[in-house]
Amino acid sequence: MARKIIIDTDPGQDDAVAILLALASPELELLGITCVAGNVPLSLTAKNARIICELANRPDIRVFAGCDAPMARKLVTAEHVHGKTGLDGITLPDPTMPLQESHAVDFLIETLRAEPEDTVTLVPIGPLTNIATAMTRAPDIIPRIQEIVLMGGGYFEGGNITPAAEFNIYVDPEAAKLVFGAGVPLVVMPLDVTHKALTSRARVEAFRKAGRVGPAVASWTDFFERFDKEKYGSEGAPLHDPCTIAYLLKPELFRGRHINVEIETGSELTLGMTVADWWRVSGRAPNATFMGGIDAEGFFALLTERLARL
Ligand code: BDR
Ligand code: CA
């Protein structure tokens, strides 16, 4: 039986690749896509998610708009990375499939209540506002969640939006604190992993040839590579968000440790930092499997093979 997932997202080119990977994978049943403000404002993330579904010929997927601002702060966006649409790189048609009428938070709550306990996995690949809002409004859903597999944070690698913080956690640190403290089985794909999953010429050219969606994926990676290559001085750019879906398909591609991870919400200097007790020196109870390593060859091979199926 396919594993039921909900992707909570702020597309974003790398979010788009994660969604396509899920749609290409029969091991996963995508119950819906919940959109949040992040890389670009909510109106654009909700539009982009539908563009991506239509690109994959899946207008049947339900897409919900959620929170348009973090729980306690002003929204910070990342057009400098993703372009002003959030999906710059290739111009795709405006979506014709509808946006669902319910709010994403209501969908999360209703679905987790309706599905049998421990059968729905959440895959947040943007700021954690929708997830934390759902948990705050309906705490009864928390023990019903099978697992949360998220992209966010960084420890040995530092941050990407500030020296200490990764973008998804930085945008809504209060939400992240709630999610990390909720007691749900949590798998974290931080920058420590995603900065080892770098695109290269050969990998992007393999995408380009990967079936119908391949050229769009290659044009997206070409677009955000420009920014990241200059910033990091690397050969390619990290493909962050698809690591979550790849983990659900092939967990053996990743290595990590079950440790305590706390979120900084007080300090201006290190706001949004994921304080990961990698060496287990704090005595605090583990609350997350924090990944540190990836088989990058295996990851790109999986991605290319799956995208070619769409
Ligand atoms: C994360 O931030 C966003 O810009 C990406 O889509 C990814 O989810 C990486 O820090
Ligand atoms: Ca994202």
Image (spheres, rainbow, N blue to C red):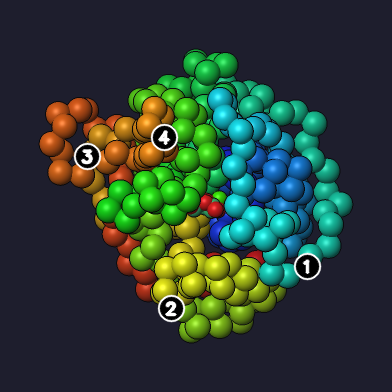
Residue at x-position 74% and y-position 62%: 55
Tag 3: Cα neighbours inside 10 Å, few (<14), some, or many (≥20)? many
Verify CB contact (< 8 Å) between mark 3 and mark 2: no
Residue at x-position 27% and y-position 41%: 276
Image height of 52 relative to 204, above or below = above
Q: Earlier in the sequence, mark 3 or mark 2?
A: 2
Verify CB contact (< 8 Å) between mark 1 and mark 4: no
- Element type at mark 2: loop
Tag 2: Cα neighbours inside 10 Å, few (<14), some, or many (≥20)? few
Q: Which residue is mark 1?
A: 91
Q: Is residue 296 left or right of residue 227?
A: left
Please, what is the three-letter code of the amino acid marked with disc 1?
Thr
- Element type at mark 3: loop
**As rendered, which of 288 and 161 lies closer to the eye?**
161
Residue at x-position 56% and y-position 25%: 72
Residue lying farthest to the front in this orientation: 269
Q: Quadrant of the C terminus?
A: bottom right
Mark closer to the observer (3, 4): 4
Mark closer to the observer (2, 1): 2
Q: Tell me the tag on residue 277.
A: 3
| Spatial separation of the CA atoms under disc 1 and disc 4 | 38 Å
Q: Which residue is mark 4?
A: 268
- Element type at mark 4: loop
Q: Earlier in the sequence, mark 2 or mark 4?
A: 2
| Spatial separation of the CA atoms under disc 2 and disc 4 | 33 Å
Q: Earlier in the sequence, mark 1 or mark 3?
A: 1
